[in-house]
Every structure is written in structure tokens, then in C-alpha cells.
């Protein structure tokens, strides 16, 4: 293969991923006056961010003026069970309001309060109504606003292009290697700084709200480039995914349903969430149904209903109900919003207005009218708190020149993410990553990636074609088997024994992935793409399993049946994953930096 | 479990043909599920776009039994399964492969539309006040998921191929969202008439019928834009003024 077969481009800053984080980073870097390339696997505007429903958290205090950044900070830390990077949690809480207002200046049209300001809604774990939203399609509003603003900033966008490896020169990252999906041609991108904004890893599990894109590419690219990953054991299972019909299993039902007054019931018709309220949240949770209802209707004296406790807790309560035989016909529980018609004269209209896409989704996909009947819901893989370990201020990873922001970065959410804290995360840290990547890029000279490195990567990428025919296995079966294994052995409820089994099976899966063959040619070949994604998926799955084994306690989203309690010692440690010199995965526990005293005080004051 | 046959277009810009695939179907399945199942079991290299599987991203547009649809929102129980279900790519755009078309034209069109230009913030806190009532009109347009099904069905693009002169219903919706945004100060009427070809639309309403977001494209976006164009470009006073100038 000669030089001719690659198209190559050069930028100061290369952003991989065009969700909220990538777009925001690209806009910021471009505004700093450097040249910017932006790459995404799908078409522009189709990234995961488009699917976010409920809203973005920012202490604008438009609905409740008792809110401010300190309360948001304390809520985020409590939600993350204090494993969060306190500095990131501080920056996030302080900067989110400005980032939300900036979206409005770029054309976003949020729902309004009576006095014409941005309306905010209640969400699990947030003390005050804090989520700026547009009905239940906030992510669409956000990504479209960034996209429509971004296309006029001189950013070079390459859609439907997948990066398969980062290119390095010594310690430094100097570019990336990938292929365009349309023709399957290879591409080399030279860059002085690279920002990863590739999102999550949800495809590692069978029941998931995530699309085909979420194969942990950014995590794996960073890992192979020598960067540290952190807190990979923390995978969020959202309590409410659709459970029926089978083909829609896992599709998300926004927490906004509960924020608007929706309640969870078991097959006995009982609101089981009242039965198990964790100590940490007892003083801030309603004692009866009446108080819970008043809270959802904006009564400031009332406390939140237990349906709005953190996601990990609600998910486990649902699992318990189902396990103990009180589930719904298709293995979930009931989520009822229709009942509010008893309380609101125009209830049906209100539901359609506040939750239009949920109404649509159930009507069309399940044949259920949510203004009339309850939905059936159960947990679904949703979000990964773990990711690339970054400097809290600059978002640079442990590899010079490599930055990460959004879901693929670790730190902000600790052991559990609060709903709405992701969309704000994307903007706050996307902006920071863009700024610091531009700054870093300015100080560097460009480096030509080594030609032999590029050629080796191209050969490796084409290998699945050579194995086609004969009895070579296709990529899909390997993917399905991995998903089944992760779901059952490293899922919501974990034990040492099961996870050991999972770890033992990686070797076999790696070997199978290394042997898969694909048919057809290089043009828009989904089988080939899946084959190339497999090794990323395997890498992140292994990181999740190995990290989870090491954390012998239950905390946040990580729940171990063989270690039910929290261990205060482990509460001071993050889990770090890196690639050892021998190429094997190393997992270690490292102390969390000591928190600044003023921030500790804020936490105490908000207890 | 029963089975059904799907007649799927396979091929590239150089040509192709329909191929029949028979696969198991179960309760609640949508067309995209069947296509995925065929891809996993019989045709690993079948090209198809998708992301959300919930009608939110606008990736999986295709023509099912001849009508433009999101494959992820088209349930099999709404289709007659005793005969093959045809699944083919959108016709208004060049084919890349199988069910995937080259929609890049749409992205270029958007770049040519004048972007949002807000007025100065007027509230004491440096932001704006907008009433819910005033933003609702724009929120309807902003529901658009850019599936381009309306572009696919519009005869001006599909049959007359006027891609160079006509931006299509999706971008009239976009332009309307900007024009009717309570904060926007730009004026796009001249471009709408001269460059964007709003006059080609003869209000057949086919676009409105296929929109999965149920945006009333014709009545709420295109007709008001046409009215603005008429008001500005053809009102007698403006016309007189122009005559004197030239
Ligand atoms: C159904 C759903 C509802 C949600 N609701 C909310 C909510 O209400 N509030 C909230 O705060 N959060 C919510 N979340 C979470 C939130 O939407 C995501 O965490 C967030 O959008 C992730 O944004 P991102 O920019 O990090 O990545 P994404 O938006 O996922 O973008 C990733 C980008 O990286 C690209 N990419 C990936 N790999 C490669 C590669 N190898 N080469 C090139 N490009 C690549 C992809 O193409 C894509 O463009 C929700 C998530 C889901 C799934
Ligand atoms: S109403 Fe106008 S834009 Fe819509 S399909 Fe008909 S001609 Fe095209
Ligand atoms: S207006 Fe409707 S049909 Fe047209 S692109 Fe948008 S969502 Fe699709
Ligand atoms: S896959 Fe997103 S709209 Fe169909």
C-alpha cells in the first residue's frame, strides 16, 4: 500500500466525536483562533446527545431562588458518594449556568417560566428544580443549537468517519488514523492536540439505551495510547427503560416522567419506593404520597417523593420487586403518570404537553396511551461514570496532547451521576477541553506520524476481509456473546465469583474477535465496522470487570451482593486502569486528592 | 413465531437489485429490527443507518412499501406481511449503498442559510425574557430531527431535481424557526425568494404528511414564509420604490 491510498489532513486541534462535548470543544478551540477538525462516526447531529430527554442541570435559580452553585456542588458530590473529583464538581457547578445562558444566546429555545425566564424541572438527587429543558427533547435542542452555531465557525467537519487508533510520537499524541464509512478509505489526521469526546460504552451490555456508536472507542483509544482510565466499575443502570415489546427493550423512559408526578408501583399496586429510603436521603424525602405530589407540583415546603431518589437505588428496588415476584407481566414494574388526571383537571393534555416524545414513543412502539394506562419499565444500561482520567481544570489526560471531555472522561460523577448533570458536563468541560487544547496546540510544532505505523494499522484493519469465507465466524455473534456475558455477570448485581468467570472468558473472546471474517467490500460495510469496534468493546468490558472485582464494597452504581456495605477505606480511593509494559491490563487503587476545606464546609452545610 | 419476507434493495450507485430475505418476526417488531436481524444472520455487509431506535435521531429514513418512513418507528403489525415488505433507500438523494444515501447536500444547504442573530440582551441580568406563548411556534419547528423524509417526498426535489434552486421543506422549517424566533433580528425574505426557491412550493402538503415529528410544515412554516416574501417583495410601495431606484 503506497502513500496515495490515504487522504491526510492537518489541524491544530482534532476533536474526535461530535456530541455535545465534541461540538462545544470544537467551537471553543476555533474561537481561540486555531484550525479545528471535527470527526464523528454518524451524521452530524445524530450523536447520543440528541437522545437526551430530561434536561440539563444548572443552578440558574429561576424557579427556586434558594438554589446556587454550592447546593449543586453538594448534590453532585452526595450523588457520586464522594468519589468525584471535587475540583471538577466545583467547576461544573460554578460554570453550568453561564454555559446554559450561552446556549440561549446561540438560539436554543428552552421552556419558559411565567416571568419569561428559562424554566427548570425537578430531577432525582437535585435539591431544587434545576433542569433547564425543552419538553422531553432537551438533547435535541442542545445538539442542534451547537451544530447550527458550529457550522458557521470555520470548523472542518468529517462525518461518518471512524478513528481506529491514535498516532504517537514518543510520549505525545500527534494525530489519529481512521477510515471513512462511505468508501472505506483510510485517513490520516495530523494534529498538535487531540480531544476525545466519543461518549460511552453501553453496547457492552445486552439491555441498553445506547446506540451502535457506544463501543467505548475513546476509552480504548486512550488506553492503548498509554493514558490512565479511572472508576470504570461505575456503570449507571437507568431504572426506567422500556421492557416490552422485546424489540424495544432498553429504550429509555425519561426520569422526567417521575419529575412530573409519575409513580412506581408493583403488581400489588403498592408504591414500593416508600419502603426503602437510604439514610443519606431520609431527611430530604417525602414521608407520604401527598407530600410527594405537592413537591412535583412545585410546593417549596415539601420534600421529594422516593421515586426521585438516585438512579442506582431506584434501579435496585425495581430489581428486588421483580425478583421477589411482584413485577409486571413482562418482567418490570409499573410506571404510572396517568393517575395525575385525578389531580389535574386537564391531566391528559398536561402529560402530552410535558412529555410529548414519551407519549409518542409508547403509542407508536408499544401501542400504549400513557395518559390512560401505566407503562412497564425496568433497568437499562445507560451511562458510564468511568473514563479517561483527566486534569480537572484542563481536561488533559495523562498523555501529553490528549484531552478528553464528556461521557468518555472520568471524575465529575464519582460513583453515580445525577440526571441532568451530563448535558451540563458536556458544555462545561467541552468548553474547557477546547480552550486548553488550543492553548497546548499553539505551543507545539507539528510532527509527521511515522509511515510504518500507519501502514501497519491499515494492514491490521483490513485483516478481517482476508479471513472471509471458509468457517470464519462473523462479528455479530462475538458481540452478542460478550453482551450476554456482561449483562449477566457484571450487571446491576455483582458477585466475585461471577465476575471472575467473566474475566476468564475474555481471553477466549479476544481470540474469537481476532479471527472474525467479514464478507463484501469496504463500502459502508456494517459487518466490517462491527469487527473493528469489537476490540474496543472487549477492552472496556474487561476494564469494567477488573475494576469491579477490586472494589469490594457497594457504593453508588456498583452493587455487590457479596459486599453489601460501604467500606470507608475504599471511599477514599479511585480505581485506575492502565496498560502495563507487558501489554496486560493493570488495575490499581489510588487515593483521591484531599478536598479543599471550603468545599468540605459546603458539603457539611448541605447535609 | 412466524416469518415474513423483506424485499431489500442491495446495490450501489453503479446499479443493484431487490433481494428477498425471509426472517422470523415476533410481537412488537419494527422494520429496523427485521433489517438488523437480516444483517446479523444473512447479510453482514448490509448498509443501513440508525442510532436511537426511538424516532429521535432521524437516521433510519427509508421507503417502506413505497412510503417514506423511519424504519425504527414502523411496526410490522401495521404492514401486510402476507406479501414481501419492500425496503428501499430514499429516492431524492444519490445512493451510496443498499439503504444508505448521500444526504450531504442537506448539510450544505443549511450552511447557506443566514444564521441566528439575536438582539442585544434586554433584561437586567444580561439575558432575555420570552413568554412561553411566544416560543411555542418556534418550538414546533425545532422538533425537527433532520430525517429528510420531507425532502425525499417533495416533488420539486424528487421528480424535478431542483436541488440547486430549492432548499426543500426541511429548510423552510429551519428558516421559519429563525425568522419567527422572538430574539432574531436578521431578515431572510429576499434570499428565501431568490436563492432558496420558496416560490417553487405549490403547497401539495406531501411533506407535512410524512413528517414523523408531526410538524405542520406547509401551513405553519411555508405559507407564512411565502406571505412574508409577498409582503416584502411585492407590496406596491416597495415595488414603486424599486422602480424609481433603477
Ligand atoms: C436516551 C438517553 C437519554 C439521556 N437523557 C439525559 C438527560 O436528560 N440529561 C443528561 O444530562 N444526560 C442524559 N443522557 C446522557 C447524555 O445524553 C450523554 O451522556 C451525553 O449526550 C454524551 O455526550 P458526549 O458528547 O460525551 O457523547 P455523544 O453525544 O455520545 O457523542 C459521541 C460522539 O463521538 C463519536 N465517536 C465515537 N467513537 C468514535 C470514533 N471511533 N471515531 C470517530 N467518532 C467517534 C460519535 O459518532 C459521536 O459523534 C441521556 C442518554 C441517553 C442514551
Ligand atoms: S408542500 Fe411544498 S415543500 Fe411540501 S412537498 Fe409540496 S411542494 Fe414540496
Ligand atoms: S421537518 Fe419533519 S420530515 Fe422534515 S426533516 Fe424535519 S422531522 Fe423530518
Ligand atoms: S434510529 Fe433514530 S430515528 Fe430511527
Image (spheres, grey):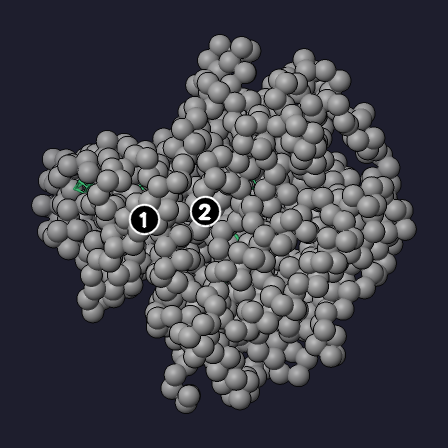
Pinpoint the chain carrying mark 1: B
Q: Position of residue A598 (x, y in %)?
A: 85, 45
Dot 1 beta carbon under 8 Å from ligand 3: yes
**Nearer the N terminus, badge 2 or badge 1?**
2
Q: Position of residue A582 (x, y in %)?
A: 73, 79
B234 horizontally vs B173: left or right: left
Q: Looking at the figure, which quarter contains the C terminus of chain A?
A: top right
Badge count = 2
Spatial CA span between label 2 and label 1: 12 Å
Residue A306 appears in the figure:
yes
Quadrant location of residue A360?
A: top left
Residue indicated by mark 2: B52
Q: Which mark is residue A242?
A: none
Q: Residue at x 49, y 71 (%)?
A: A516
Residue closest to the eye, B1 or A455: B1
Quick check: which quadrant has ligand 2? Answer: top left
- Marks 2 & 1 on one chain: yes
Pinpoint the chain carrying mark 2: B
Residue A388 appears in the figure:
no
Amino acid at each position: 500500500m503506497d502513500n496515495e491510498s490515504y487522504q491526510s489532513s492537518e489541524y491544530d486541534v482534532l476533536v474526535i466525536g461530535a456530541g455535545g462535548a465534541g461540538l462545544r470543544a470544537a467551537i471553543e478551540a476555533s474561537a481561540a483562533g486555531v484550525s479545528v477538525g471535527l470527526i464523528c462516526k454518524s451524521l452530524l447531529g445524530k450523536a447520543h446527545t440528541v437522545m437526551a430527554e430530561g434536561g440539563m442541570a444548572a443552578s440558574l435559580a429561576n424557579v427556586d431562588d434558594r438554589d446556587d452553585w454550592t447546593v449543586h456542588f453538594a448534590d453532585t458530590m452526595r450523588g457520586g458518594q464522594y468519589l468525584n473529583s471535587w475540583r471538577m464538581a466545583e467547576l461544573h457547578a460554578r460554570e453550568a449556568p453561564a454555559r446554559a445562558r450561552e446556549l440561549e444566546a446561540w438560539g436554543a429555545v428552552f421552556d419558559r417560566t411565567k416571568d419569561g425566564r428559562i424554566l427548570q424541572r425537578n430531577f432525582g438527587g437535585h435539591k431544587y428544580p434545576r433542569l433547564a429543558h425543552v419538553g422531553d427533547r432537551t438533547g435535541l435542542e442542545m445538539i442542534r443549537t451547537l451544530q447550527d452555531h458550529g457550522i458557521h465557525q470555520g470548523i472542518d467537519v468529517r462525518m461518518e468517519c471512524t478513528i481506529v487508533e491514535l498516532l504517537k510520537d514518543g510520549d505525545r499524541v500527534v494525530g489519529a488514523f481512521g477510515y471513512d464509512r462511505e468508501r472505506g478509505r483510510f485517513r490520516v489526521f495530523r494534529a498538535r492536540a487531540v480531544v476525545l469526546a466519543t461518549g460511552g460504552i453501553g453496547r457492552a451490555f445486552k439491555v441498553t439505551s445506547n446506540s451502535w456508536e457506544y463501543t467505548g472507542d475513546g476509552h480504548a483509544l486512550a488506553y492503548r495510547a498509554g493514558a490512565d482510565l479511572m472508576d470504570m466499575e461505575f456503570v449507571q443502570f437507568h431504572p426506567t427503560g422500556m421492557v416490552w415489546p422485546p424489540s424495544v427493550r432498553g429504550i429509555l423512559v425519561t426520569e422526567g416522567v417521575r419529575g412530573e408526578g409519575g409513580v412506581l408501583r408493583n403488581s400489588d399496586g403498592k408504591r414500593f419506593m416508600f419502603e426503602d429510603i437510604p439514610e443519606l436521603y431520609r431527611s430530604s424525602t417525602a414521608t407520604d404520597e401527598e407530600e410527594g405530589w405537592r413537591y412535583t407540583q412545585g410546593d417549596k415546603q415539601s420534600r421529594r417523593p422516593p421515586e426521585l431518589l438516585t438512579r442506582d437505588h431506584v434501579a435496585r428496588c425495581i430489581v428486588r420487586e421483580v425478583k421477589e415476584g411482584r413485577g409486571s407481566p413482562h418482567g418490570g414494574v409499573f410506571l404510572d403518570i396517568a393517575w395525575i388526571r385525578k389531580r389535574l383537571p386537564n391531566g391528559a393534555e398536561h402529560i402530552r404537553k410535558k412529555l410529548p416524545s414519551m407519549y409518542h414513543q409508547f403509542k407508536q412502539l408499544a401501542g400504549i396511551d400513557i395518559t390512560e394506562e401505566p407503562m412497564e419499565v425496568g433497568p437499562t444500561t445507560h451511562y458510564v461514570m468511568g473514563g479517561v482520567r483527566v486534569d480537572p481544570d484542563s481536561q488533559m489526560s495523562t498523555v501529553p496532547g490528549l484531552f478528553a471531555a464528556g461521557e468518555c472522561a472520568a471524575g465529575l460523577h464519582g460513583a453515580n451521576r445525577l440526571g441532568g448533570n451530563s448535558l451540563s458536563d458536556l458544555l462545561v468541560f467541552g468548553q474547557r477541553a477546547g480552550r486548553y487544547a488550543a492553548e497546548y496546540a499553539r505551543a507545539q510544532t507539528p510532527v509527521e506520524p511515522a509511515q510504518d505505523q500507519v501502514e501497519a494499522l491499515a494492514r491490521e484493519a483490513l485483516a478481517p476481509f482476508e479471513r472471509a469465507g471458509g468457517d470464519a465466524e462473523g462479528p455479530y455473534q462475538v458481540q452478542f456473546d460478550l453482551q450476554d456475558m456482561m449483562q449477566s455477570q457484571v450487571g446491576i448485581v455483582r458477585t466475585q465469583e461471577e465476575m471472575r468467570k467473566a474475566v476468564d472468558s475474555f481471553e477466549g473472546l479476544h481470540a474469537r474477535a481476532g479471527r472474525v471474517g467479514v464478507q463484501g467490500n469496504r463500502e459502508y460495510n456494517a459487518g466490517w465496522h462491527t469487527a473493528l469496534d469489537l476490540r474496543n468493546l472487549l477492552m472496556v468490558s474487561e476494564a469494567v470487570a477488573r475494576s469491579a472485582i477490586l472494589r469490594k464494597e457497594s457504593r453508588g452504581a456498583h452493587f455487590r451482593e457479596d459486599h453489601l456495605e460501604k467500606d470507608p477505606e475504599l471511599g477514599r480511593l479511585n480505581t485506575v486502569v492502565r496498560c502495563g509494559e507487558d501489554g496486560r491490563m493493570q488495575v490499581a487503587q489510588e487515593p483521591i486528592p484531599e478536598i479543599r476545606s471550603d468545599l468540605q464546609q459546603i458539603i457539611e452545610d448541605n447535609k | 413465531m412466524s416469518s415474513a419476507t423483506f424485499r431489500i434493495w442491495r446495490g450501489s450507485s453503479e446499479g443493484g437489485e431487490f433481494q428477498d430475505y425471509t426472517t422470523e418476526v415476533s410481537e412488537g417488531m419494527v422494520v429496523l429490527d427485521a433489517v438488523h436481524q437480516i444483517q446479523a444472520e444473512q447479510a453482514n455487509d448490509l448498509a443501513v443507518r440508525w442510532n436511537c431506535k426511538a424516532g429521535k435521531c432521524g437516521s433510519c429514513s427509508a421507503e417502506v412499501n413505497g412510503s417514506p418512513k423511519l424504519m425504527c418507528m414502523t411496526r410490522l403489525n401495521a404492514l401486510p406481511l402476507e406479501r414481501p415488505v419492500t425496503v428501499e433507500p430514499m429516492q431524492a438523494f444519490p445512493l451510496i449503498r443498499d439503504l444508505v444515501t448521500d444526504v450531504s447536500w442537506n448539510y450544505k444547504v443549511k450552511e447557506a442559510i443566514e444564521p441566528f442573530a439575536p438582539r442585544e440582551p434586554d433584561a437586567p441580568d444580561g439575558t432575555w425574557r420570552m413568554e412561553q406563548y411566544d416560543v411555542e411556534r418556534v418550538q414546533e419547528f425545532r422538533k425537527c430531527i433532520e430525517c429528510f423524509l420531507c425532502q425525499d417526498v417533495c416533488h420539486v426535489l424528487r421528480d424535478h431535481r431542483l436541488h440547486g434552486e430549492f432548499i426543500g421543506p426541511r429548510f423552510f422549517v429551519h428558516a421559519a424557526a429563525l425568522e419567527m424566533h422572538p430574539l432574531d433580528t436578521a431578515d431572510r425574505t429576499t434570499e428565501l425568494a431568490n436563492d432558496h426557491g420558496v416560490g417553487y412550493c405549490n403547497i401539495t402538503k406531501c411533506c407535512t404528511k410524512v413528517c414523523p415529528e408531526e410538524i405542520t410544515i406547509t401551513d405553519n412554516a411555508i405559507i407564512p414564509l411565502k406571505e412574508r416574501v409577498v409582503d416584502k417583495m411585492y407590496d406596491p410601495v416597495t415595488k414603486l420604490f424599486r422602480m424609481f431606484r433603477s
